[in-house]
Image (cartoon, rainbow, N blue to C red):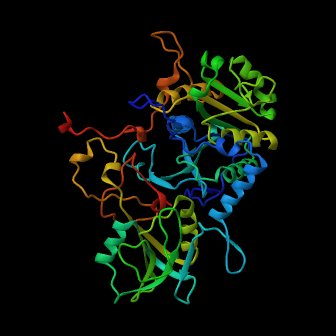
Amino acid sequence: MFIPCDRGGGSAVPDFKGFTLLMPAVSVGNVGQLAIDLVISTLDMTKVGYFYTDCLVPMVGNNPYATAEENSVELSINAEVYSLPSKKLVVLQIRSPFIKNKYRPFCETLLSWVKSSKCARVVLLSSSHAYQRDDEQLLGTPLRYLLTPDLEKAVGGRMKELNWKEMEKVAAYPGISNTDKVLHIPGGGITKLLFTESCSEGIQMAVLLKFCSEGDNIPDAFVLVNYLNEWLQLIKSEVSTSNNSTDPSSQWKIPSSWRLLFGNGLPPALF
Amino acid sequence: MATFFGEVVVAPSRAGLDEEEEAREETPEDREIRREIEKKRYGRRGRLGLEIGEREIDVLWSCAQEPLVCSRFIVAIGRNAAAFLSSFILDSVCWEVVGVVKLWNEWCRTSSTTNVLPTDSFCLFYRLIADPTVLLCQCSCYVAEDQQFQWLEKVFGSMQKKGLQVTILSTCPVADYKTQESTLTLVSPFLKALKTKEFQEQVCCPLLEQPNIVRDLPAA
């Protein structure tokens, strides 16, 4: 599945042992994917390979993180892997939707790659339909987390220190009081499948998600990536001297490919 | 989301199909019905009694030599690109038909005949008689997203690549082109290109600027 890039010194497979794999779920508002774009762009991560898979709709374009003429002509496809060894971070970006009936094969192949490359843990960025929240979820923070049992032992305490809220389970049959509680992540794409598979396979996985709706999801991406940063500390949050608050939003670099997200310029003749 | 008549409709998500549909609890009757539908849509027994998916692609080569040795492969995807090749490149003197792709999806069906009309859906392979390592493909049919990878593997799988250079020709609507100005004032049609870093020759037109992308079979 993983094909390393040929970086001139032969295509030696990069070593991800002990790394944290950060990846998005293709979910409502594409928030996870936008947040990953911010991480790759800000940390100026190097592409180390891609996934050769028949599970995603094919797409190709020129480098979405281009900053100058010289680096703008590298091709980019639907599932690529970037790495930052200094932070022991490897990032998978997924750029197109899943092909019907291919969710499960992709999840299986992905998790088997996680195990074979000996990644220490997986952090999945996702989102869920805001309109499906119950009365209690409408109040307070729209951010939630989930930890597989293996990761709970390692970092559960840190989540409590950060005062994070765990994703609530809901009744399997709403309205009937004595039913089992199940995990329900509407609009989350492969989130629930990946999470439940990781639980049963003993993989350390954290899910960070935000309740949102389709629309301009750039602010949602910033909120999610700042949430991630509270835990992983990927960038330093500088204290702003003007209002004495910590707002790292301005330190994330928006990729050049985020231009024209809502269409072209208008024809002058319209007015 | 509300329309202007006050009717509430479920807004489809940009994120694609919701996996929750597949995770729903099924009764044994539901499972049986779903299995029958899938068998009808995806599986039938072929001549040898083997299960053949209706969505499987067959690549049929007419020449005895397989794998085909190929140094140049030109692929025209879509009706416009296929018509371009018919008008300016192909003729029965210099080119011979060497293969055909047989497929079916909800949008079109191609057959194994090589005698096609321009208005038909077809996918044919030609070889330059003067240099049999030059191959050309005219693909005017729509290859569905779950068939694209298969097309790729089966076509390239039957080639013996010898310093292979691939050129893909396709078209996109101008309205899909993302640019700062309005597409109304753009002079069209216009050419844009994408190339791999291994392609060292001069490209005849500007490269496709971000954030534009190419999808489906040309991307595959």
Q: Where in the figure is residue A54, as x and y percent of width and height? A: 60, 58
Instruction: Say which residue appears at 72% left-offset and 75% top-offset.
Output: B50
Say which quarter of the image contains residue B171: bottom left
Instruction: Say which residue appears at 45% left-offset and 10% top-offset.
Output: A242
Identify the residue at the far top of this view.
Answer: A243
Is B208 or A6 nearer to us in this picture? B208
Instruction: Say which residue appears at 33% left-offset and 84% top-offset.
Output: B91
Horizontal side of B188 relative to B124 (left or right) equals left
Horizontal side of A14 relative to A154 (left or right) equals left
Count of picture labels: 0
Is residue A75 shown to the viewer in this render? no
Q: Where in the figure is residue B156, as x and y percent of width and height? A: 54, 72
Q: Where in the figure is residue A271, as x and y percent of width and height? A: 18, 33
Q: Is residue B192 above or below residue B57?
A: above
Q: Is residue A244 above or below residue A39?
A: above
Say which quarter of the image contains residue A122: top right
Is A91 or B153 nearer to us in this picture? B153
Q: Quadrant of the N terminus of chain A?
A: bottom right
Instruction: Say which residue appears at 69% left-offset and 46% top-offset.
Output: A16
